[in-house]
Amino acid sequence: MEGPLALLVGCFFAASVYLMLSDSLIRILIGVVVLSNAVNLLIFVAGRIVKEVPPIIPLGAQIPPIETANPLPQALILTAIVISFSFFAFLLVLVFRTYQALGTDKTDEMHLAEPQGEPIPPRGY
């Protein structure tokens, strides 16, 4: 059961990296959303996927008698969903304000701070 989900996590990570390397701010924003979903799914798969058996230990036992779901990754995922949604909302407002101020969402066309007529600064090292 975890094998296909692990493959899906890898596809999510690959797609998010591809989108975040784009020159469009909207595609970068979508890449961040896909990356946060990939991380949430990775945490979920790491916590083992089992039937809906609550992690309750009977009196006198040290461990549960049967394999149970791990509650810690589920709690971490709930926290990560809230954090990723707030980060997405912040980035969405930032992209919207950038588009309003500069009139473009392409990163190569955002040269407001560079003086006109000057040589273009180096793009790499």
Image (cartoon, rainbow, N blue to C red):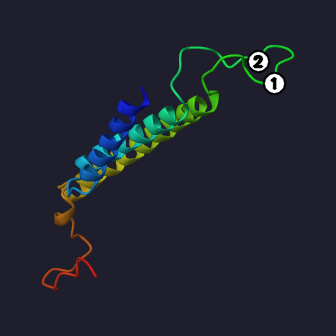
Q: Which residue is label 1 attached to?
A: 62
Element type where label 1 sits in the image:
loop
**34 left or right of 68 in image:** left
Considering every residue shown, the one lying at the far front of the view is: 65
Residue 118 drawn above or below residue 13: below
Depth check: 31 or 38 in front? Answer: 38
Discs 1/2, front: 1
Q: Which residue is label 2 attached to?
A: 57
Provide residue 60's location: percent of width, then percent of height: 87, 16
Depth check: 105 or 13 in front? Answer: 13
Depth check: 57 or 102 in front? Answer: 57
Crowding at mark 1 (Cα within 10 Å: few <14, some 14-19, many 20+): few
Report the residue at 35% width, 31% height from top: 4
Report the residue at 21% width, 59% height from top: 102
Report the residue at 30% width, 41% height from top: 11
**46 left or right of 41 in image:** right
**123 left or right of 12 in image:** left
Residue 100 got which mark?
none
Q: Quadrant of the N terminus?
A: top left
Amino acid type of the residue that numbered disc 1 sits on in the rendered structure: Gln
Report the residue at 72% width, 20% height from top: 64
User: Is there a contact, CB below 8 Å, between mark 1 and mark 2?
Assistant: yes
